[in-house]
Amino acid sequence: MATDFNPNLQKAYDFVVASQNADGGWGYRRGGMSYVEPTAFALIALFSPVGAGGVNVADIRFQAVLKGLGWLRAQHHEDGSWGVMRDDQTGSWMTYPATWALNLLLGIPELFAYYGNPEDKNMRDRARGWILNRGREGGVDDVTFKQVKNLFKIDSNLRGFSWGAGEAGWVIPTSLALVALVVEDVPIMREIPEVINGKDYLADRACPDGGWNVGNPWMIGKKLPATADATAFALIAWRSCLTAADFYSQNTQVVNAGIDYLDDYIKKTNSDHILVLSTWALSLFKEATEREDYRTRMVNGLVRDGQPVERLFTYRGQEIKKRTLVGQDKETGGWANSPYTTALAALALSDNRYYLEPK
Amino acid sequence: MSINAQPKKRLSRRQFTRLILTSAIGGTAVVAEFASRPLGLLKSLGITFRRVGKGFGEQSKVAIVNASSYEVDLLTSLRTAWELAEIQSVVGKRVVIKPNIIYNLPGRAINTHPTVIEAAILLLQEKGAKEVVVAEGTAYQRDLIDLLYSSGIGPMLDTHNIRFVDLNHDDIVKVKNKGGYAGREITWLPKTIAEADLIVSMPKLKTHHWAGATLSMKNLYGVVPGLKYGWPKNALHVSGIDANIVELYETIAPQIAIVDGIVGMEEDGPLFGKDKAANVLVVGSDLVAVDATCCRIMGLEPIKERVRHIWYADYLGLGVMNQDRIKVVGVPLASQDFEKPPSLDKELNRY
């Protein structure tokens, strides 16, 4: 019989709500300053129909979402962007997850009825404009194109999305931007030139041995290996952008190689955050049995026969045992004492993909 | 119609002279202001005075001690170097150790070795530091837990119960730049760095394909938060690697350098070069002098064309790079003739 993860999910929502800052935002760790990205992901997680987006929502969750949205709206800049936190007046990559959250709010009627504001659509439209015009990297001249091709074996005419306006594109911000754009209207936005070009960018930046890193698969003739965080975000983006046409292109191979890389990596990681992020990404591609395995591991951490397992390290000949993967805290319901990681864990546990296909 | 012609007022000789002098002074000031941009006249004058002061001051002390491997007693070696270099007191201070932790490429001498960091922790505790924290904001990945464990640094920190701070996801504060060399008035810094009394930069002795060499000043790139400057901190590359390195050096708290030169990296550093043993630890509180000395250990003269940020920091009077202004204590400086890094077009920094 399949494991019921709903109790874990509910505890995760409770942790997210309990770790909201007094100003309404969320941080990367409990008690840490409010940033736009963790606030956006906390909201995306809480928007779940079994979180704070369905019927009979507990008042404490309802108030948390209202307050969180209030904080997010208050940080929005006139030019359509968000900075990384309250005092940051320049546009940043955190515009992408914030727009993602706003698109869910606008795309799910029940959510909008609960939490929407008349100005949300205008805010989203301006955000989309910023992403396409300022977040997206510019083109390069022919000389630079050739030099970059020579040194890094990448096509700099493919335009990704950047961490800050006017900079080069990189894999994680490109992935977040693609999802933010596509969830506005999945069938239409998947086909806009900027999204298709962004997918080509991700395909081009894939590491030769599978997966993604920051965006440099090659460094002056040498392979730069993939990293788990970039690979996970890229796979989430692929899941939202894949169309039938991709199954007849090299994109399928690139995605499969990424899945293989992450599937291998997740067995070795010592990071609860990476375990959570990888579980989320892989669960979007895997069948129910494998999804359950990933989720069980994510919830329980490293266990054998129900007992916690420590990993063994050696330092200067001395054996050091440490339980690096703790999983979900049984008391608080959180992962790694982080509302950000816990919000991602809630998404990883959710079979309802409202966050990629809002309706 | 009559014309009421008034006699033309003529300047007296004194007035004429005053006018010429005022114009000359004003004109010179305008020309000097433009010529000294982007720093401006006042800043340039300040730098000139600082440089002149460095020229007359005491030599900067840089200590070099031998360490044949990572298995030997590094604490004693480091204590000797610390005392020879006459490093300031750390009693009661909150100290942040900033090692160089970049990537997990097994078998390559990329990251600062845990045994050297361990020796620094023990020494700082022995010298009376109030708190010792190890912190890094790695450039190539958002989560660095796995990197901590694969590099051996995580287990070492667990052994000593030392707190580690991920600078990329720390709370951040706005800090006014002291130099203004990179065209920005402020830099966002992690609170852990902004509130530290002392930062110990602990790089590995490596060549660098963009910057010529990556040592204690370049290592400071790792303190800026990825949340704000992205991964791999390319916002700083775009606005000038050299300018940003010296800006960080001047802006953040007083610093000390401990360079892991036991096994360094030659040729295509900082990631893909070849291991090269130099069997030294290098210590000092003038990071310009430490880095210049390390370059010479690698057989790389820190000239403007090769390791520009060291030259630039010297030019700005933030330290000294000329050998006659540096007093090497401990073992004599011996050049190891590291293979040089490839020369790349600086225009490609954005990638």
Image (tube, rainbow, N blue to C red):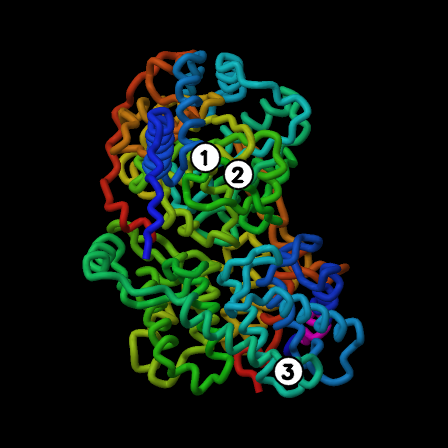
Identify the chain of the residue marked 1, using the numbered disc in the image: B
Q: In which quarter of the image is residue A197?
A: bottom left
User: Rounded to the nearest whole Å, what is the CA distance between mark 1 and mark 2?
Assistant: 9 Å
User: Rounded to the nearest whole Å, what is the CA distance between mark 3 and mark 1?
Assistant: 54 Å
Disc 2 residue crowd, few under 14, some 14–19, many 20+, Cα 10 Å: many
| Magenta highlight range | A4-9
- Of the residues shown, which amino acid type is indicated by label 3? Pro
**Can you identify the residue that label 3 sits on?**
A118
Element class at badge 2: helix
Element class at badge 1: loop
Q: Position of residue B52 (x, y in %)?
A: 40, 18
Is residue B190 visible in this depiction of the protein? yes
- Closer to the eye: label 1 or 2: 1
Q: Which residue is drawn at 49% across and 12% down?
A: B84
- For this rendering, which residue is in front, A304 or B187? B187
- Of the residues shown, which amino acid type is indicated by label 1? Thr
Q: Residue at x 46, y 54 (%)?
A: B230
Whether marks 1 and 2 lie on the same chain: yes
User: Rounded to the nearest whole Å, what is the CA distance between mark 2 and mark 3?
Assistant: 52 Å
**Can you identify the residue that label 1 sits on?**
B112
**Can you identify the residue that label 2 sits on?**
B153
Q: How many labels does the image show?
A: 3
Callouts 1 and 2 close, C-beta under 8 Å: yes
Q: Position of residue B60 (x, y in %)?
A: 43, 16
Element class at badge 3: loop
